[in-house]
Image (tube, rainbow, N blue to C red):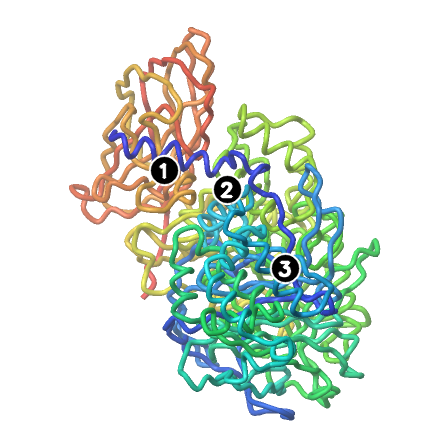
Amino acid sequence: MGAARFVGRVGGLAVALGVGAAMFSGYGVAWADSASTGSSGASSSSDSGGSTAAGTSGSASKRSSTGTAGSARAASATSSAVVSTGGAQTSSRVRSRSHARVAGLRAKPSSSVAGTSTSSADVTGTPASSTAAGGTSQTSATVTETDAVAPSVTKVADNPLANAVHALQAVAPKAPVELPTPAAVSGVLTSVVHGIMDPFAGNNPTVPVDSPLALALVEFTRRESASALATATPAALTSNALVSNNPISINPMLDIVDGIINGTTNAMDSTGTPLTYTLIDGPSAGGKVTFSATGDSNYTLGNFSYLPDKSVLASGDEQFKILVAQNTQFDQFLASIPIVGLFVPQTLVVLHQVPIVNDLLAPIIGYSQVATFDSSSVLPATDPVAYTYKMPSFDGTLISVNWFPATGLGSGDTATTVLDGPGLASAGQTDPYTLYGITGLTPGVQELRANGYNVVTWDPRGEFASGGVLQLDNPFYEGRDVSSIVSWVAGLDNSVLDSAGDPRAGMVGGSYGGGIQLTSAATDPRIDAIVPGISWNSLNNSLYPDKAFKTSYASLLLLSLVLSNARINNQIYLGIATGDLVGWLSQTSQAVLSSSGPTSLLNQLQAPSLLIQGTVDVLFTLQQAIDNAETITANPYDTPVNMIWFCGGHGVCLTNDGTVNPNLDSTFDWLDYYVKQGNTGTLPGLPTFQYTDQKGNWYESDYLPSDPTFYGTPDDAVTDASGGVLAIAPILGGSGPAPQASIPYSLGLASKANNAINVDVPTQTGQYVGAPTLSFNYSGLGTNRYVYAQLVDNDTGLVVGNLVTPVPVTMDGRTHTATINMENLVYTVDDPNTDNLTLQITSSATAYENFTAFGVINISDINLTLPTPATITPQP
């Protein structure tokens, strides 16, 4: 291979393995006016020209007191993390629905920023303290094209003139220039991972930056500032004389539209300069502010939605502040500087809040105004209003939940409820206008509300505004948290109940938000139906199949948790560390993984389950959904189970993702039948099994792939093929990373290998669905414990499903036979001359990279059997 590709593989792998993560994850101190008492939150930058997704925004105003409706984006005042509602990439084309289904799901979910106080952390990454949403944290965060947390600034408690002189002295010409801090370097790492789906569908925050950059910016403008200071009188410095020509005007307003409090600053700039919006003081009682984003159905730059804390619904007394500032050409120039530009937005937010300095620098960095909002202008309200609440769980741990009323819900009305769980390292959705959860895989709050459901989202235990320690969807912790949420929903006036304490409730969500559905429904029979997307059956089998550790995705898991300041069970850190370094998990680490998720519980699951899994999911493969279905259908409750395989998941769809994706339509069919209508029988009209192939065509079957009836006669495609000698070494010539995807995302994907034994695989017209069976004889010597098998589509050069299978081998010089089921695939053969395969047995794979693996192996007598479906029907 070329030197550039080699460097890319090694460098990218180092990123994914989290090299230096501990050093790079130091925390700066964010700054806000010491007199402020509200928590900070997030802001929205000047319009970048993004298009608005088509959709509906709700009905006419139920109560309108001071302004117009705004749209929103998930930017709660609970964490200084840049997060995303998205995560796993999925196919995003959807079938239209007659009942107000929103089209245009190709738009990518926009990132959102939430602000909170920073806290010290021990060596395990567990913060020593945390600040609840709202409260009295004193930070500021801004949403710009690149986000960073504000640097620390020391204020002098003297008169304003002394303050200004002190600020200028701090950047005297002879002051030494500081090198980039570890936190600054970590910002680069964060920017790589930000916006890319992490292992459990969580994205990562922007790392705090220390103060030297802010001082450097002040030094850049020192001469202009010093000149203005020299000519200004003390009286002028203590007045607003220096900004008397401020071109920004504001008229803050809050308004209730269909149960959602919307807000706008009504900011205008007479010069036409673009404006930025930053939440500098979050809601004082713990509420959450979410700025409008381009993916929202009614996007308007700078507008926002506001979830008041439940405690102020009756009294209506909660305040927050938004900074409106110009985004000048000077600001844009600084933001365009590589690396340095990452920290500019928050540095400017700091300068805009420093008395006198802000006035002096206004002609350069732009003018600003602060808009103050008070919930008393719209609360209390007559009809139900969306709000946030810290709900005590079974052990007293406070879980941050967000409640949204169904569209059109009146004060005496009731509706069924859907619990929408987030991905790992993602906060619960606070955006009432988001169309979907994970890029088209799951419905968003707006879609659920528009279809007549009350919606509950939440921050899982150990993450963001919730307390406790994260245990990875453990039934004794996160599972009981969900049971507590169900009990809380049962006590709400607007909930439909099946009986006292038993609300009519379903669940949706993907990845981490999918795993919690299986765990919760298996332990709490009050949950009426679930739609778990890209979830797992066993974390051991997912992360440690045949005792081969998935280094790439496990490292991304660790990185996302560290950067989101999650409070985690220490054994999770230890397991990933030993897995990355030596490819081994201790019995204790395996026990932790075994206790997380639904593995041993599904024989008790009674909730009808629609399982959605990705054909290119390299973390939670198709086999995880098959195992779930097999266990559920074998339990004594005749639990209805349907399944969908789509081109997506924890991976990249590099082939045609199809003209129709039934995920959303099938999800609402499932929820409407089992939750809204309260039925218990098998859903009529919905195919038992729907799946797509590499050409984007969709098929259906009356049988699940966990049912032997689904399969026909297998194709013995390869029989006793000769092999060869294979040299074993880390990285060189092996499978991955996939060059079609970006690093570090691509490291978990398979690619055609250069150092491999290649075997032609003749194909037959028809279709292959399921797990191929591979066997071969071998003998070898070395330290490696695996070789890796994959099937390459000769027409496209892509590995089918982007999946590589580790094959355990014993390297003792003796002759052995290896037999293994490879990863499940879907592959259609229209013409055997063009649609044909090559079996590769290769030396290494970046998805399972182990730097201690060396050796040589002689492989012979290779056999490969491909599974075929018995009866399938193409979908129109």
- Give neighbour class at mark 1: few <14, some 14-19, many 20+ (Cα, 10 Å): many
The residue lying at 46 percent from left, 56 percent from top is: 644
The residue lying at 59 percent from left, 40 percent from top is: 539
Extreme residue in the top direction: 813
Judging depth in this view, the residue of 106 and 468 nearest the camera is 468
* Kind of residue at disc 1: Pro
Q: Are marks 1 and 2 in contact (CB under 8 Å)?
A: no
Image quarter of residue 568: top right
**Marks 3/2: CA–CA distance:** 23 Å
**Marks 1/3: CA–CA distance:** 52 Å
Residue beneath disc 3: 166
- Give neighbour class at mark 2: few <14, some 14-19, many 20+ (Cα, 10 Å): few
Q: Quadrant of the C terminus?
A: bottom left
**Marks 1/2: CA–CA distance:** 33 Å
Q: Which numbered marker is on residue 662?
A: none
Circle count: 3
Q: Nearer the viewer, mark 1 or mark 2?
A: 2
With respect to residue 587, does 657 lie above or below?
A: below
**Residue 569: percent from left, percent from top:** 70, 41
The residue lying at 34 percent from left, 28 percent from top is: 734
Q: Which numbered marker is on residue 737?
A: 1
- The answer to which of marks 1 and 3 sits earlier in the sequence is 3
Q: Quadrant of the N terminus?
A: top left
**Residue 401: percent from left, percent from top:** 70, 65
* Kind of residue at disc 3: His
Q: Secondary structure at mark 1?
A: loop
Judging depth in this view, the residue of 51 and 843 nearest the camera is 51
Residue beneath disc 2: 179
**Residue 7: percent from left, percent from top:** 34, 32
